[in-house]
Amino acid sequence: METGKAAETLTKELEQLLRNKMGPLFERYGLDIKDLLTPLKWKPVVLIIGNYSSGKSTFINEILGSQIQRTGQAPTDDSFTILAAPEPNEPEGEVPGGTVVNDERLPFAPLRHFGESLLSHMRLKRVTNTPILQDFAIIDTPGMLDSVTEKDRGYDYLGVVGELAKLADLIILMFDPHKAGTIKETYQAIRSTLPGSTGEDRVIYVLNRIDECESVSDLLRSYGTLCWNLSQMTGRKDMPRIYLTFAPQEGKVPPTGFETWMNEREELKQTMSSAPKMRLNHILQEVDRVVRELGLEIEAMAAFQKRFIHKFKGVLRTWGMAAILAFFFGDLVMKLLTGYPNIPLAGALLAGNMSFEHFLWPIVWALLVVALASLYVQRILFPKFTKNTLKDLDNLIPLDTAYKKDLWNRVKHRIHKLIEDQARRQILITHGRYLGKIEHFLNKDLSRFFERI
Ligand SMILES: Nc1nc2c(ncn2[C@@H]2O[C@H](COP(=O)(O)OP(=O)(O)OP(=O)(O)O)[C@@H](O)[C@H]2O)c(=O)[nH]1
Ligand SMILES: [Mg+2]
């Protein structure tokens, strides 16, 4: 595993490669490669989420060695706080949410669409003299609550958690014995938000404040409740490790029998400091996912194009035949109806006496049919074909594996938009060539990076 400087070099090389090889493809299919590159350039991120009052902010203060975050028994934090070391020449202090999401050097632009209400509940704290923040940034979050709706919060809380989870290299999910996994927002986060935003290996479960259990059996009851609730929420039969921790309380000795768990807090901190190492893996997985999504998009566009060409060939056959008939017999029909021209092409052919003027009307008739065919294709056939494709989008390409189905569900809306907005343009692109490029990137270029970590 490469660390420190080597990791930085690797990230830079990957960025260059992405820019050169994937940049033009992203643009062609209406995507912005910046969305992929910006998180790559920023530091590793540890996201701390969990029940209100489970001790998130207390834990953060402990790691930072300073009372940076406010703590308290009632729900205390109502804001997302990004804690990071200042960049060179930047002063210590707070940056408001509005500035944070518009700073191109930071990876928080995707939060912009959650609206003003979120921005006033978000800030970046630049904290100096904390060595650990040199290695990664920490995000403290408002605690998860019961019976709370988006209206109460003023913004889509779980949506924001999901967006931050995508960015995070490590997520610490904190519970406490008082409400071991019974909070509604926690349930929704584990059930729906996290699986779509992160990998299982990036989530660390913590049962905190265990010193408040009266005895070991009391702790076991809380632990059992949490395990049961977690298995309901994750749907997993195998239980992930749950760290059992507590913040040292001045003058208070933990109940007897708790010695076993005295070291877990330190272990948790150790695991947390592995975030920079996990980052390389996370970045490569993320690049792999995004490029595969693009690959599927291109595959869908290729299928869309192929189907249309098939339809178009049918039209070409019918209307081509009509054009030939119009060429040879158009002027003959005209003569029968109007008496003009004197000698139609068929007559001249039979008489073996042809000149340029005999071709004039046949050419006009054939061109007329071609014009009509083109009008038919543009005004009727293509719009109808596009509409029908959109209606039956799920059958555009075979989704033969669960992975492909999952990928499809994530990019379906993009494919819909691409067909809706640029159907004509997509018909003219040589998709096969781009698919080859994607395959080469995944199988050759990216696997070389995977081998290096
Ligand atoms: N006994 C005990 N108390 C703790 C522990 N951790 C935190 N506390 C206390 O629990 C209360 C809540 O802690 P916070 O750190 O504010 O919790 P939080 O998760 O940040 O809460 P919100 O910001 O409201 O979501 C505070 O009064 C802390 O002093 C612990 O391990 N043991
Ligand atoms: Mg807090």
Image: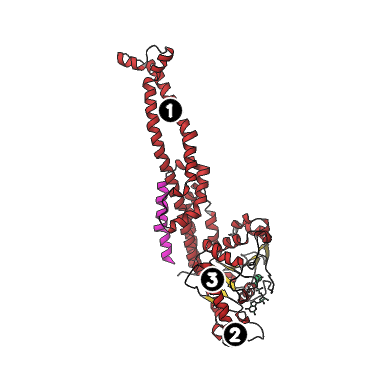
Query: Which residue is found at the position 45% from the left and 52% from the top?
Result: 296
Q: Contact (CB < 8 A) between labels 1 and 2?
A: no
Query: Which residue is found at the position 30% from the left and 13% from the top?
Result: 351
Task: Provide the residue designation for mark 1.
Answer: 370
Q: Is residue 4 visible?
A: no
Judged by depth in the image, the label closer to the viewer, 1 or 2, is 2
Q: Contact (CB < 8 A) between labels 1 and 3?
A: no
Q: Is residue 67 left or right of residue 391?
A: right
Residue 436 image position (x, y, % from top left): 39, 51
Q: Quadrant of residue 329?
A: top left
Q: Is residue 258 visible?
A: yes
Q: Does the numbered disc 2 mark a residue whose Cβ is under 8 Å from ligand 1? A: no
Q: Is residue 85 magenta?
A: no
Report the disc number at residue 230: 3
Sooner in the amino-acid sequence: mark 3 or mark 2 = 2
The secondary structure type at the circle numbered 2 is loop
